[in-house]
Image (cartoon, rainbow, N blue to C red):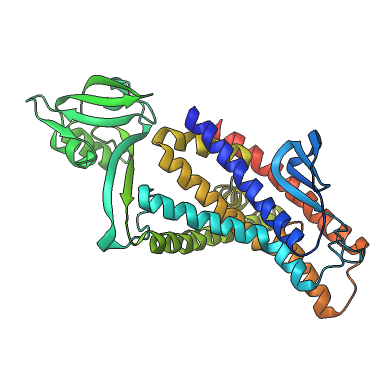
Amino acid sequence: MLLLIVGLILFIGLVVVHELGHFWVARRNGVDAEEFGIFFPPTLWRKKMKGGWDFTINLLPLGGFVKLKGEYDEDKRPGSFGAATTWAKTKIMLAGVVVNLVAAVLLFTVLALTGMPKLVSNQFTVASDTKIIRQDVYVGGVTAGSPAAKAGLQSEDKIVTITAEAGKSYEIGQNDLPTVTKSLAGQEVTIEFMRDGQTKTATTRLNSEKAVTESIAAGSPKGYLGVAPVENVVTRSTWSAPIVAVGITGQFTKLTLQGLWSALRGLGSIIAATATGNTVARQHGQAAASEQVSGPVGIFMILKSGSVLGFSYILMIIALISLTLAIMNILPIPALDGGRVFVMMIARLLKKPLTRQIEERVYGAGFIALIVLIIVITIVDVKRFF
């Protein structure tokens, strides 16, 4: 619970530093700030600060914001955003992206030095300067009626050792779980596992090799123990930590963009299938689109799961969220930072004034679409996790 609370505080911190980037760069470029808000209105608490701006904490936990003086491009009052140069406006709008990117790289560097969880099989490392410092096996899922189910194993249990009938004990993590259970097929074994910080033991008989072979032939494969193992590997680097941080930043940026592309393709399938009445294609599209995204509920559940594995996992999740915030905000999506820069640049290229009416229509439509998307994603998350 403590790690979950820490994770939530760190997540809020990402929003705060993102907005602080806008705030600091705006003031450095002569633009006055009127309000610095955590979350979105309605306002729960407000305080007037010495610089003349308001600090607010708001009700809707969907992000945060900085309200600048004269945010419309046509506002030319001294100290207003509209009166700033195009270069100054670009720096102000992209400051949050830079802060989140820098935060992600710094967090990855700290993790590389202290303990970097391995989340993907080919995760970037410098092989000559990488040492495994932790290797645990957790229960990801339990098959109904399996030896694991009879032993009372549950999801998120950490399997410590498996002891054979003859008394030989195998430390799981140092040994591969499937290899150990196969070598002890059909035997009665004692399983030592951790749950909620407490050590427990249970005795069960593993499936025989014959039973496993027959289940595979029948098309309903069983395992010897009947669990879906989740391996927890943590590595550490020394001199290469900054290199590992940059490499992992690039790797996960690529994976994030691939996930976004998959989600967009799924959304396209939904639209096309709905238009043609193809129910199966629509369901496949919904699955492809929804599995790539998470909203506030999904983030909470991911942090909850990470808290079971330790602080390094919480920090890794926060670093990835910071990187994702940077990526999402650089994309030309109206109502987000990259979208505002995109709209401004298009207006400059076309040499047409960016009026308040145009900005309100474009950004207003983008904001409404964003809120609708968050609501839809939240519904998907609730169905997924509950």
Q: How many marks?
A: 0
> Which one is in front, 314 or 32?
32
Q: Is residue 262 visible?
A: no
Residue 212 position, x and y percent, is: 22, 36
Q: Identify whether 347 is placed above or below 119.
A: below
Q: Is residue 273 visible?
A: yes
> Which one is in front, 9 or 212?
9
> Which one is in front, 315 or 68?
68
Q: Identify whether 203 is placed above or below 229.
A: above
Which image quarter holds the C terminus? top right
Q: Residue furthest left?
A: 166
- Residue 34 located left or right of residue 16: right
> Which one is in front, 300 or 372?
300
Q: Identify whether 280 is placed above or below 140.
A: below
Residue 109 position, x and y percent, is: 43, 55
Residue 313 position, x and y percent, is: 43, 42
Report which quarter residue 166 is drawn in.
top left
Q: Residue at x 33, y 46 (%)?
A: 234
Report which quarter residue 193 is drawn in.
top left
Q: Identify whether 163 is placed above or below 62.
A: above
Q: Residue at x 71, y 46 (%)?
A: 64
- Residue 24 located left or right of residue 290: right
Q: Residue at x 17, y 37 (%)?
A: 180
Residue 309 position, x and y percent, is: 39, 36
